[in-house]
Image (cartoon, coloured by chain):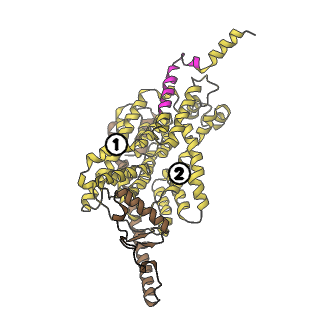
Chain colours: A yellow, B brown
């Protein structure tokens, strides 16, 4: 046995050697990015439930994938490229993925098939009280207005000349501030951009307490921020039970492409409200949500292989994503101001900023800013109306983009 | 213009979208979101008004029934004399005393006002 040759083979087969050949340095950069994301998730508590999984998925793929020859990799981008290529024999072949894929390839099937985002929506529905929205239906308008960033970022991405319409639509939906919707739409329209879009969406959602307050102060006056809103009417149990049924029927009939998201959201909510399925509601809110979050986080992180992540498009996506977020906040605030004037000062425009989804963080930011202006101000329940309306609004926006580009 | 056809032409051929076409999709998309939301809002107002009327009828019937029934008033905590320095009794509707104490403490903390400077008239559970 040639010990030296064995040691040489061992070295050449190791990841350490791969860092120094064929652009392996990019993997080192990605490992650095993964460590920064882990720091943000663990130390700064930025969306830790998802960001820690995404960051570790990013770490795992960049430790094991150094090009198509990496047979031991946990994730193989080329398998998915073939999966999407109509001219390749492995086109739409899950069998090939199961036979040749690594652990993360197999978990990624749930993302590719749109299963995880829909199940997350089911959990969100089971955790959401739509009472404030039912009590004050005009807050739905704020949820619609806050989709402005989606379409502005779409336009910006398409006009930049760097992206196709499908890719621009996927970038725009970052402005919906709704991670599952962004993942759902991107896997359908531009799966090659899933990594940067998912990371941008979740990072900006986590940064809402930093992104929104300056815009809120810029666009509202002290007097407007001090407005105390009247208490909402009491919503009966029957109304809460009927609500998910009506919304599912109406929105799915309007835009059938929203069926997976709106259908799951409303089914989860019906389980919560109907009063006879506590066990199911509890399972969806906790056990199922946690399991899906684990799979979703780690498999989305796996799409950040250095070759596909480190390029100009990723930087543009990060910039356009921030623009989308900022303009969605602006859209909500502007319509909030309009409602303030139309109601003779009864609506605090700060609740408009909660029209971006990001439940319940955006509503909490509105509450915090309202209380800074007037310590006796309690805007949380008023902001929850536009906040949950934003979930419906971003699902409708995604449904429209899917109808046009899908 | 058929937006789906436009999108198919631009993406299938691998060419980028024209600025005008992108603007059109953006404007129509934002409009569709508003249209869907406004229609949903109208439906919610209609169902809400139906339930409000029904609740008002039920409340009126209940009030009439209560008026017809003359019951001797039971002795309650509300009749007991208030403690020295107290602002009076707080009426609890479906809220356990422990929860009420917690709510009052949270409100005082959020308002940064000592609890003994606040007066709570009633606490009602909103279902």
Residue A389 drawn at (x, y percent): 41, 55
Q: Verify whether residue A21 appears in magenta.
A: yes
Does B61 sit above or below residue B35? below
Residue range highlighted in magenta: A16-36
Question: Residue B13: which quarter of the image?
Answer: top left
Identify the residue under disc 1.
A326
Name the residue: 63% across, 18% down: A13
Q: Which quadrant of the view contains residue A3?
A: top right
**Chain of the residue under the numbered disc 2 shown in the image:** A
- The residue wearing badge 2 is A260
- What secondary structure do most residues of the magenta stretch adopt? helix
User: Mark 1 to mark 2: distance in Å?
Assistant: 28 Å
Relative side of A28 to A379, left or right: right
Q: Position of residue B87 (x, y in %)?
A: 35, 71
Is disc 2 placed on a helix, strand or loop?
A: helix
Q: Is there CB contact under 8 Å for labels 1 and 2? A: no
| Residue A309 in sight from this viewpoint | yes
């Amino acid at each position: 046995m040639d010990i030296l040759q064995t040691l040489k083979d061992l070295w050449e087969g190791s990841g350490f050697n791969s860092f120094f050949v064929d652009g392996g340095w990019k993997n080192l950069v990605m490992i650095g990015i993964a460590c920064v994301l882990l720091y943000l998730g663990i130390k700064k508590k930025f969306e830790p439930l998802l960001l820690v999984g995404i960051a570790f998925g990013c770490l795992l793929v960049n430790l094991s994938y150094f090009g198509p020859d990496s047979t031991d990799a946990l994730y193989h981008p080329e398998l998915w490229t073939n999966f999407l290529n109509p001219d390749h024999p492995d086109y739409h072949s899950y069998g090939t993925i199961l036979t040749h894929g690594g652990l993360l390839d197999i978990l990624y099937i749930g993302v590719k098939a749109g299963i995880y985002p829909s199940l997350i929506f089911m959990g969100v529905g089971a955790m959401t009280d739509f009472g404030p929205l039912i009590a004050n239906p005009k807050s739905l308008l704020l949820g619609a207005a806050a989709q402005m960033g989606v379409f502005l970022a779409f336009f910006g991405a398409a006009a930049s000349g760097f992206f196709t319409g499908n890719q621009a639509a996927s970038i725009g939906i970052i402005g919906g501030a709704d991670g599952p919707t962004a993942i759902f739409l991107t896997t359908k329209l531009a799966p090659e951009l899933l990594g940067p879009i998912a990371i941008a969406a979740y990072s900006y959602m986590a940064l809402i307490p930093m992104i929104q307050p300056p815009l809120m102060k810029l666009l509202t006056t002290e007097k407007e921020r001090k407005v105390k809103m009247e208490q909402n009417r009491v919503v009966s149990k029957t109304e809460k039970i009927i609500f998910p049924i009506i919304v599912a029927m109406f929105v799915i009939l309007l835009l059938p492409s929203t069926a997976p998201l709106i259908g799951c959201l409303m089914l989860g909510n019906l389980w919560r409200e109907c009063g006879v399925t506590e066990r199911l509601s509890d399972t969806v809110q906790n056990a199922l949500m946690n399991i899906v979050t684990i799979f979703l986080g780690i498999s989305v992180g796996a799409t950040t292989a250095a070759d596909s992540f480190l390029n100009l498009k990723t930087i543009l996506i990060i910039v356009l994503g921030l623009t989308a977020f900022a303009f969605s906040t602006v859209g909500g605030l502007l319509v909030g101001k309009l409602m303030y004037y139309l109601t003779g000062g009864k609506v605090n425009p700060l609740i408009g900023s909660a029209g971006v989804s990001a439940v319940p963080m955006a509503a909490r930011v509105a509450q915090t800013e309202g209380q800074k202006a007037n310590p006796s101000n309690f805007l949380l329940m008023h902001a929850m109306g536009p906040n949950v309306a934003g979930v419906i609004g971003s699902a409708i926006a995604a449904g429209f983009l899917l109808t046009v580009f899908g | 213009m058929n937006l789906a056809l436009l999108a198919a032409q631009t993406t299938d051929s691998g060419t980028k979208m024209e600025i005008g076409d992108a603007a059109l999709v953006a404007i129509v998309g934002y409009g569709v979101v508003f249209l869907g939301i406004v229609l949903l809002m109208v439906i919610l107002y209609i169902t809400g008004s139906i339930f409000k009327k029904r609740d008002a009828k039920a409340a009126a019937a209940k009030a009439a029934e209560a008026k017809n029934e003359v019951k001797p008033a039971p002795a309650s905590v509300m009749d007991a004399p208030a403690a020295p320095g107290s602002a009076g009794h707080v009426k609890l509707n479906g809220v356990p005393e422990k929860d009420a104490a917690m709510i009052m403490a949270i409100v005082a903390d959020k308002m940064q006002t000592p609890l003994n400077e606040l007066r709570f008239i009633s606490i009602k559970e909103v279902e």
